[in-house]
Every structure is written in C-alpha cells, then in structure tokens.
Amino acid sequence: MDGGILSIWLKVCLSKKQKIILKQYESYLQSYKIGYSFLYGYRKLEIMSNDERSQIENAIGYIPKQELAISGLADPMFRAIEALLKYFGGYLAIGVDVSAIDKPKGEYYPIITYDNYFRDKYVYHLVSWEFVAGYFNRDDDKGIRDVYSLDRFSLNPKS
C-alpha cells in the first residue's frame, strides 16, 4: 500500500473548535495504528499566480483560505479525506487523470499552471468528496465509511 501527502483546500479558516475536532479526529485515526497524520497541520493557502487564482475562482466560485495537508497510507488517507471534505467542505487538490475514469461522479475542475518560464505545464484537479468517494473509495461499504466519519465529533456536544 502506497502513501503520501495530500492537500485539502478549505473555503474558510477553521475555528478553534473545529481545530479541536480535527485534533480529536487525528487521535482517533491514530488509535487504529495506520500511520496517519495531519503532518503540516493547517496553514494559509497561497496561490502562486493571478491566472491560477482566476481559474480556481471561476471553477468553484471562491478562493480557498486554508490548506490542510495530510500524510498517511493511501487507502485510509482517502477515506479520511472523504470524511473531512464531507464535514468541513472544500476540495482535494490532486493530480488525477480524469479522462481515464469511466463516468466520474462528483465535481472535478482542472487547474493549469506553468513554471516561472512558462515552459513546463502542470495540471491538477480540485475534486469534491463525491469524486473521492466514487473514485478512490468506490469499493468501501457503509461500515467502513462509518468508521471514518466525523459525525461522532460534534461542534455542539450534548450535556
């Protein structure tokens, strides 16, 4: 099983309560001993060029404010990303060949960037939780989705 680091782009910056929920969720996932971490935590998202900024705003209707970088093994990481996107909103920024996918589900937007000399072109996609669920996690059942769900963590805990 492969792994790596991926970025979720959030519409707004997380509140203190949301950061607490995120920390609890990380501890919960680590209890399964699957080698998981919000390695870089959360940081202000910096978009490199005006062209990239314009493409993003035209695609999703806003400029994301915060980045949540996650590291881990591929299968559990994509399950957690699906749950995080469902809970907090936003998009996963990832290089994926959408043309190779038969009838992709969910939202996906190509963003084209170039190096400083406009020689090398790089295409990445902003994809929704529905896309992650239908592509990366397509074989997961309700039981595994419940394990990764953030529904057990509440912003308004009942006394």
Image (cartoon, rainbow, N blue to C red):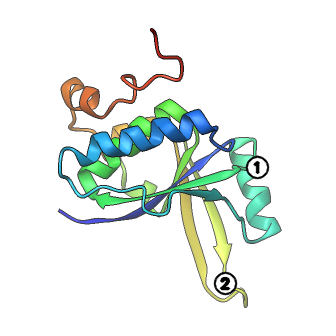
Q: Where 126 falls versus 133 (above or below)?
A: below
* Left or right of 71 in this view: 21: right
Q: Where 105 falls versus 81 (above or below)?
A: above
Per the image, the residue denoted by label 2 is 115
On residue 24, the disc is none
Residue 24 appears anywhere in the view = yes
Which quarter of the image is occupied by the C terminus?
Answer: top left
Determine the residue positioned at 28% across, 43% down.
29
Q: Residue furthest front?
A: 159
Foreground residue, 15 or 92? 15
- Three-letter residue code for mark 2: Asp
* Left or right of 149 in this view: 59: right
Q: Secondary structure at mark 1?
A: helix
Q: Position of residue 142 (x, y in %)?
A: 23, 24
* Left or right of 48 in this view: 66: left
Q: Position of residue 140 (x, y in %)?
A: 22, 35
Disc 1 and disc 2: Cα gap in Å? Answer: 20 Å
Q: Where 85 falls versus 68 (above or below)?
A: above
For residue 148, what is the image quadrant? top left
Foreground residue, 74 or 28? 28
Local packing at callout 2 (Cα closer than 10 Å; few below 14, some 14-19, many 20+) is few
The reply to whether callout 1 and callout 2 are in contact (CB within 8 Å) is no
Q: Residue furthest top?
A: 159
Residue 105 appears anywhere in the view = no
Q: Position of residue 64 (x, y in %)?
A: 69, 49
Per the image, the residue denoted by label 1 is 57
Which quarter of the image is occupied by the N terminus?
Answer: bottom left
Q: Secondary structure at mark 2?
A: loop
Determine the residue positioned at 51% across, 57% down.
41
Foreground residue, 43 or 157? 157
Choose the circle earlier in sequence order: 1 or 2. 1
